[in-house]
Image (cartoon, grey):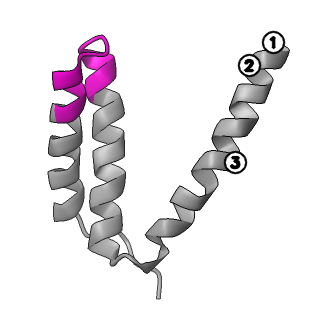
Amino acid sequence: MNPSLRLATAIAAIVLLPALSACSNLSHRQQNAAIGAGVGAVGGAILTGGSTLGTLGGAAIGGVIGHGTEGKRSR
């Protein structure tokens, strides 16, 4: 792996770490919506070749689907 790519990956991981802990106080439904929006944005970007409209559309659709799902809860 290229040293500059390795450094960029490490910096990205350090920068994104606080963002992951920011979701700890969200409800289960809000967490599902956030995950759905993220997955939808990636899917929309891939399917449209990186189009901004495709990314935003995928995020919106993924957020709505994620908000509507309950998922399994462990008890």
- Label 2 near label 1: C-beta < 8 Å? yes
Looking at the image, is 3 positioned above or below residue 34?
Answer: above
Answer few, some or many: residues within 10 Å of disc 1's Cα (few below 14, many 20 plus, some between 14 and 19).
Answer: few
Answer few, some or many: residues within 10 Å of disc 3's Cα (few below 14, many 20 plus, some between 14 and 19).
Answer: few
Q: Which residue is mark 2?
A: 5
Q: Which x, y percent locates residue 56? A: 20, 33
Query: Tag on residue 50?
Result: none
The three-letter code of the residue at mark 1 reads Asn
Quarter of the rendering containing residue 50: top left
Give the spatial CA distance, label 1 vs label 2. Answer: 5 Å
Q: Nearer the viewer, residue 43 or 2?
A: 2
The three-letter code of the residue at mark 2 reads Leu
The secondary structure type at the circle numbered 2 is helix
Magenta includes 20? no
Answer few, some or many: residues within 10 Å of disc 2's Cα (few below 14, many 20 plus, some between 14 and 19).
Answer: few
Q: Which x, y percent locates residue 60? A: 16, 43
User: Magenta region: which residues?
Assistant: 44-56
Q: Which residue is mark 3?
A: 14
- Tell me the quarter of the image containing the N terminus: top right
The secondary structure type at the circle numbered 3 is helix
The three-letter code of the residue at mark 3 reads Ile
Query: Tag on residue 2?
Result: 1
Q: Which x, y percent locates residue 13? A: 67, 43
Q: Which x, y percent locates residue 28? A: 34, 75
Main SS type for the magenta part?
helix
